[in-house]
Image (spheres, rainbow, N blue to C red):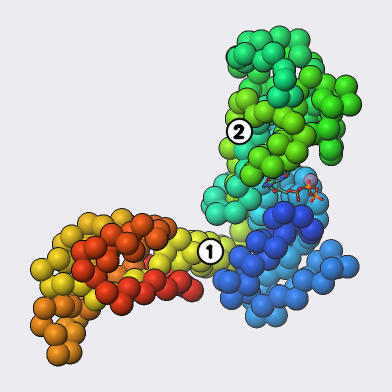
């Protein structure tokens, strides 16, 4: 099926992962004009084609070797693997990288006034979900009897209209549960977007391109997590400054013109930088503290 040397990447057409998936490629230097009406778009500066589909179709496209790579939520991938296993079909793919977006959890939730005490009080409850296989695997591993039925959307309203006792749905901020008077009771799966690859042979051109892309994506993610910090610190407090800054590599220390008591420190921090840290640096006598975003990073 795949006969060209162009790398085919499947991503979500429109939904929660589409913007971040597209940006990831753009930040890696892939120039591509994704047109809304087109199933397939071609990059101008690299041999890459992007196929945009519903997220549920992505694992199958990778497993059936229709595309080389796919960007998809771990939840959708796992549900697909379990549903194929149920039909005695193998799932062949390789997980290349966990991404830093699409973070959510699949949780059980019940109406706030439910008499739910613990998982074992779920006995014979009816649960509405879009993820019947992940739910089944989780509850069966705990020997809990239950009834589930599949709803592809509006899962959160099922208890209110009397369709189910509980739901098992994706949660990110918890606002949807709150709006529907539901209480989260158990996280059954934690998810994020992932890049997966098909199995089988790749031409050396494709192998190289995948390696280049993944290295760049790692750089983009690292840069997003990192900050460049510049400050003036008392020369006697260099070690205390460094110990306040978690995830900091050895700082560059420069002289400050006309002031021998202070030094200039430049460093990269690989962790989030909080206002509290700024305040503590100030207490140590640091001044002119600048925290800058990093666009690209390669180690
Ligand atoms: O059309 P297509 O089939 O491609 O899209 P879809 O409607 O099936 O999926 P979409 O776009 O809603 O989500 C795509 C992927 O984003 C999911 O498979 C997850 O991997 C990831 N993701 C991250 C989420 C959420 N966060 C999320 N909060 N997917 C769905 N939700 C929904 C959830 O179902 C619930 O309705 O958001 C609501 C809860 O959000 P909070 O913030 O109120 O808790
Ligand atoms: Zn979907």
Task: Give the vertical position of 92 relative to 227 (above or below).
Answer: above
Q: Which of 46 and 2 is in front in this view?
A: 46
Residue at image coords 32%, 73%: 289
Q: Which of 242 and 56 is in front in this view?
A: 242
Task: Give the vertical position of 56 relative to 3 (above or below).
Answer: above
Residue at image coords 63%, 72%: 26
Residue at image coords 11%, 78%: 261
Task: Give the vertical position of 256 relative to 13 (above or below).
Answer: below
> Residue 178 bears which disc, if any?
none
Task: Tell me, yes or no, if residue 166 can be seen here.
Answer: yes
Q: What element carries label 1?
A: helix
Residue at image coords 74%, 31%: 181
For label 1, count other residues whose C-alpha is less than 10 Å away and answer few (under 14), some (14-19) or many (20+).
many
Looking at the rendered image, the quarter that the N terminus falls into is bottom right
| x and y percentages locating residue 167 in the rendered image | 75, 27
| x and y percentages locating residue 48 in the rendered image | 68, 70
Task: Tell me, yes or no, if residue 200 can be seen here.
Answer: no
For label 2, count other residues whose C-alpha is less than 10 Å away and answer few (under 14), some (14-19) or many (20+).
some
Looking at the rendered image, the quarter that the C terminus falls into is bottom left
Q: Which of 127 and 203 is in front in this view?
A: 127
Residue 6: which quarter of the image?
A: bottom right
Q: Which dot, 2 or 1, sits closer to the camera?
A: 2
Q: Sequence-wise, which precedes: disc 2 or disc 1?
A: 2
- Tell me if 299 is positioned left or right of 134 in this view: left
Residue 84: which quarter of the image?
A: top right
- Tell me if 261 is positioned left or right of 156 in this view: left
> Residue 217 bears which disc, if any?
1
> Residue 189 bears which disc, if any?
2
């Amino acid at each position: 099926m795949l006969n060209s040397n162009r790398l085919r990447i499947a991503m979500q057409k429109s939904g929660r992962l589409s913007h971040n998936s597209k940006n990831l490629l753009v930040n890696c230097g892939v120039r591509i004009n994704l047109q809304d009406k087109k199933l397939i778009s071609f990059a101008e500066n690299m041999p890459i084609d992007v196929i945009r589909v519903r997220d549920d179709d992505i694992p199958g496209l990778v497993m059936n070797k229709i595309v080389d790579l796919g960007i998809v939520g771990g939840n959708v991938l796992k549900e697909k693997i379990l549903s194929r296993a149920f039909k005695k079909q193998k799932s062949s793919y390789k997980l290349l990288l966990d991404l830093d977006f699409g973070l959510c959890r699949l949780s059980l939730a019940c109406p706030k006034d439910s008499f739910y005490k613990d998982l074992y009080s779920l006995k014979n409850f009816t649960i509405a979900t879009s993820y019947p296989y992940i739910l089944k695997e989780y509850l069966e591993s705990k020997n809990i009897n239950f009834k589930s039925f599949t709803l592809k959307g509006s899962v959160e309203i099922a208890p209110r209209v009397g369709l189910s006792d509980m739901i098992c749905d994706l949660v990110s901020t918890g606002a949807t549960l709150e709006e529907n008077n539901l209480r989260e009771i158990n996280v059954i799966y934690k998810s994020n977007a992932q890049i997966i690859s098909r199995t089988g042979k790749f031409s050396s051109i494709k192998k190289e391109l995948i390696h280049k892309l993944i290295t760049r994506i790692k750089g983009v993610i690292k840069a997003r997590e990192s900050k460049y910090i510049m400050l003036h610190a008392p020369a006697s407090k260099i070690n205390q400054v460094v110990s306040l800054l978690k995830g900091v590599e050895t700082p560059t220390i420069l002289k400050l013109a006309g002031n021998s008591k202070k030094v200039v420190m430049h460093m990269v921090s690989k962790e989030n930088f909080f206002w509290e840290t700024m305040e503590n640096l100030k207490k140590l006598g640091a001044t002119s503290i600048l925290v800058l975003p990093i666009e690209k990073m390669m180690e």
